[in-house]
Amino acid sequence: MVFKRTKPHIVLSSEQKAYLEKITKSGKSEKREYDRARIILMDADGKGVNTIARELHTNRTKVYLTIDKALSFGVETALKDLSGRGKKRTIGNEERAFIIRTACTKPSDLGYPHEIWTNRLLTKYIRENAPEEYDLKSISNGTVSKILTRSNIRPHKIRYYMEKTDPEHERKEAEVLHVYREVKTIREEGSGKLTALLSYDEKPGIQAIGNIYPDKQPDEKHGYISRNHDYKRNGTLSLMAGIDLITGQIIPLVEERHRSLEFVKWLELVDRYYPDDYKITIIMDNHSVHTSKETMKYLSSRPWRFNFVFTPTHASWLNIIEMFFSKMARSMLRGIRVDSKDELKNRMLEYIQEINNEPVIFTWKWKMDEMPGG
């Protein structure tokens, strides 16, 4: 059965049409005013309700209400909300303060075993413990949620932060940034210094996970890789890598462990990589193997060859090599399956070789403008 429209289309004067078109073209119009102006213009052009709702990605009810209001009260009135619209606010400032104050208190401090609030638990507490004069006995979960959202309070979420516990944080941070400043100067102006500047870290515990049943590649029926949940563990490997901050070349070493023995082995690899007259500066974190007896013994055998610059405690994000590890984890290592640790090692080294064939030079920008000459 076909339903015929009984109401006439809106008729606009030239001034009204120009006014509405100005609203739709202005970037400062409120969205609801903009939407209503579009609805009125399209109805005046003879378009049906279904067509308007579809083209404006809205619902038929909204279109009907706007058209009815324009026909009953005029175009300008249809753009605004009628007076008395909406439910009057019934929860006062004191009640809202009580709700927010409660949400900012740990549930465990109020006798619950919970560490953080759920919306239902918080609402239950408010209903049962709000003062009688607040009249919150029947407050809904949705109302509590809206009050907290408007106040930007989210007691059901945890966002972690890192406390600065290193008393030498500023000094170490400045030393790292000075290395990045030197890198920038060498790239832009060149340098007569025989120096190498590296960023180093370890990525331990890379799992060599193997499939028990083979993967099924995408086809016309299933547009994604199908993988069985069962798998086998073939052990883990540790990647030790340093990136040359001038050339972007990565110097890797893959071993089963990452003790002082393996770290010294990586230093020997770096020692062979650069000419004997180069001074090698390496940015690294405060891992114990970097200052162990074995490491110090090796460094004493190569006096003036190496210079270690340590990042502040819990500030490994200052180390550029972390960007490479993140990229590697999100691309090459993501979902990887291998039959052995040897296969995993070979594929990691192959990936790094591909990077070295077209090296990516990372540029550090944070706080560089605050450095001398920035």
Image (cartoon, helix red, strand yellow):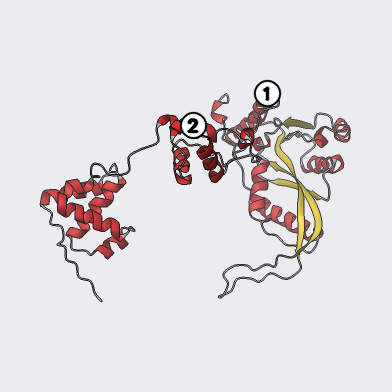
Q: Position of residue 238 (x, y in %)?
A: 78, 49
55 versus 176 height, above or below: below
Q: Is residue 296 visible?
A: yes
- The residue at which mark 1 appears reads as 171
Q: Label 2 crowding class (10 Å Cα cut-off): few <14, some 14-19, many 20+?
A: few
Residue type of the residue flagged with mark 1:
Arg
Which three-letter amino acid code belongs to the residue tagged 2?
Pro
Q: Quadrant of the N terminus?
A: bottom left
Q: Which residue does the image show at 23% across and 51% down from the upper left?
A: 37
Residue on which the image places disc 2 = 131
> Tag 2, which secondary structure?
loop
Quadrant in which the C terminus appears: top right
Whole-percent x, y for residue 193 in the image? 69, 31
Does dot 1 land on a helix, a strand or a loop? helix
Q: Residue at x 70, y 38 (%)?
A: 199
Relative to 104, 345 lies left or right: right
Nearest the camera: 242 or 168?
168
Rendered image quadrant of residue 56: bottom left
